[in-house]
Amino acid sequence: MSRTPPPAPDLRFETAASAQGARIIAGVDEVGRGPWAGPVVACAAVLRGPAPAGLNDSKKLTAKRREALVPLLQACCDVGFGEASVEEIDRLNIRQATHLAMRRAVESLPQQPDHLLIDGNDCPAWVICPRDVIKGGDGRSLSIAAASVLAKTRRDQGMVALAQQFPGYGWERNAGYGTAAHQEGLRILGVTQHHRRSFAPIRKMLCP
């Protein structure tokens, strides 16, 4: 007996927001909460036309497919990006730094939205406009899926660039997550300025 595939993201949340009077609806997502190194990156995306076929949660797509979607999304979306640095993550904590990156992404849109669709279950305190906070939203809302793919691609490219400056940690493959290769690099090469010192594995290395 074949299993029914999970539903693909659609426009149900965007349609509901429009019915309530919203004109500019932005999907907001972030990537990079869990890695031991590198910034957290957020994206806000406003669909201005039909979404490209096959758009989905970035985690369900291959890197090649995500990269192919980027120019298609740039053609049909208004896009804003925001980052929070490693220093900000260590100073604020990862939750607050993620909220900061999201705020920067929304503020960098060409027009400010009047409704947000936010992935997850945690609404940032700075959000004052109408919003829907949607658990698993990157697999349910096309606007959030667009933000998910764009944020993931941008952060991965940034980690590839960092890997060229700091070889030996495997960031071009693990994006800063605590893989065996990353742990081995830390053992041999030590901690860089791009490592999150507030994260327990790095803190334990610095303060055994």
Image (spheres, rainbow, N blue to C red):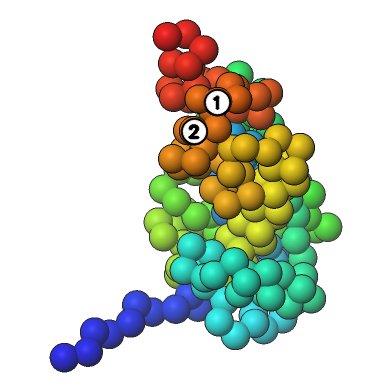
Quadrant that contains the N terminus: bottom left
- Residue drawn at x 49%, y 33% as measured from the top left: 184
Image coordinates for residue 113, horizontal then vertical, percent: 70, 57
Mark seen at residue 175: none
Residue hosting label 2: 184
From the viewer's perspective, is residue 63 above or below residue 48? above
Give, as a three-letter code, the residue at label 2: Glu
Residue shown at the point (58%, 60%) measured from the top left: 148
Residue nearer the viewer, 64 or 59 = 64
Question: Mark 1 is on which residue type?
Answer: Ile
The disc placed on residue 188 is 1
Q: How many marks?
A: 2
What x and y, as percent, mark residue 175?
Answer: 58, 47
CA gap, disc 1 and disc 2: 6 Å
Q: Residue at x 45, y 42 (%)?
A: 179
**Is 79 rendered above or below residue 159?**
below
Q: Nearer the viewer, residue 174 or 144?
A: 174
Instruction: Please indicate whether residue 12 sits to the left or right of residue 172 in the image.
Output: left
SS under mark 2: helix
Q: Quadrant of residue 208?
A: top left
Tell me: 196 left or right of 120.
Answer: right
Label 1 crowding class (10 Å Cα cut-off): few <14, some 14-19, many 20+? few
Quick check: marks 1 and 2 in contact, CB under 8 Å?
yes
Mark 1 lies on a secondary structure that is helix
Q: Residue at x 59, y 66 (%)?
A: 63
